Image: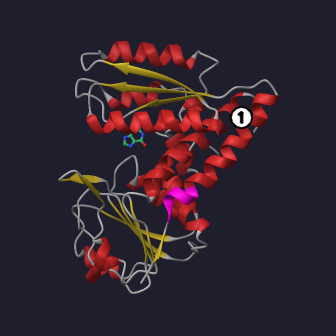
Amino acid sequence: MSKLIDGVLVANSVKAEVKAEVEALKQKGISVGLAVILVGNNAASEIYVRNKQRACEAVGINSYKYLLSESTTEEELLALIEKLNGDSKVNGILCQLPLPSHINKSAVVSCIDPIKDVDGFNPQNAGKMLSSARCLLPCTPQGVIKLLDYYGIEIEGKNCAVIGRSDIVGKPMAVLLNERNATVTLCHSKTKDMKNILKNADIIVSATGKPRLVTADMVKAGAVVIDVGITRENGKLCGDVDFENVSKKASFISPVPGGVGPMTIAMLLKNTLKAAKLQNGEA
Ligand code: GUN
């Protein structure tokens, strides 16, 4: 039976650290603020944005929410971002994805000032990440690394399989694991014989949104399995991993919900604090 990776526990410890630092900055007259923008009525995004706002409140970060209608034009959205780029109360800007199809995601992500880009999606931050320079890093992959570190799971020299090559999770996940000296295989929908790759992996990170993609026969005994997938099936949240059976074989496994999800928000708060420190010469 594997050990459960408790994302709520680790997220709470990160949030406590952030809260203490936010309070210390307040003593110096520096307040920390995050602007969250949501365009349209995606039900899942509405929940994520509400959770992000609540998390800000809990650690003393001021949150500024912008709920824009589905019919908002790209020009209007870019104008709002430009305004927030110039607003000193706002240290971090997050535009919730996905965006309506008439808005160009690249234009939006590129418009966010790199020093306020708490998602780490701006090409300037993505490029810095690739060249190992200091920058704001994407929240979910950072959260996965934090979970591995918290549980004392060694990364260096390990065979890691990342499943899914999204810009938000899979690609940066592979980069961050490589940065920690793992040997990384990035699997995707065109990968041949994925089972053979997974069987050889010490650490598996799955981020596809395909329920039950990772089954026990694909996992090496004693492997560490991190499930980033979130799919709603008949009103119930489920990950990419067949938890019931894989948990009998893995050494550590993260559940859905309660695994990576809370970490994404905790790392967003940490990035907002980092952005505020950078902007105030405190980092
Ligand atoms: N949509 C799903 N995950 C994310 C995320 O981490 N950031 C943003 N901005 N949108 C998302």
Figure check: 260 above or below 270 = below
Could you tell whether 17 is left or right of 29 in the image? Answer: left
In the rendered image, residue 22, in percent from the top left (x then y), is placed at 70, 36
Q: Which colouring convention does the figure follow?
A: secondary structure
Q: How many marks?
A: 1
In the rendered image, residue 68, in percent from the top left (x then y), is placed at 34, 18
Figure check: 50 above or below 156 = above
Q: Residue furthest right?
A: 28
Bounds of the magenta segment: 6-10
Q: Which residue is mark 1?
A: 277
**Location of the N terminus (image quadrant):** bottom left
Q: Residue furthest left?
A: 234
| Snapshot quadrant of residue 282 | top right
Viewer-side residue, 2 vs 214: 2
In the rendered image, residue 12, in percent from the top left (x then y), is placed at 59, 52
Figure check: 74 above or below 157 = above
| Snapshot quadrant of residue 51 | top left
Mark 1 neighbour class, 10 Å CA radius: few under 14, some 14 to 19, many 20 or more: some
Secondary structure at badge 1 equals helix
Viewer-side residue, 259 vs 282: 259
Three-letter amino acid code at the position of disc 1: Lys
Query: Which residue is pictured at 27% across the width and 71% down the height?
Result: 242
| Snapshot quadrant of residue 41 | top left
Query: Which residue is pictured at 36% across the width and 37% down the height?
Result: 47
Figure check: 24 above or below 1 = above
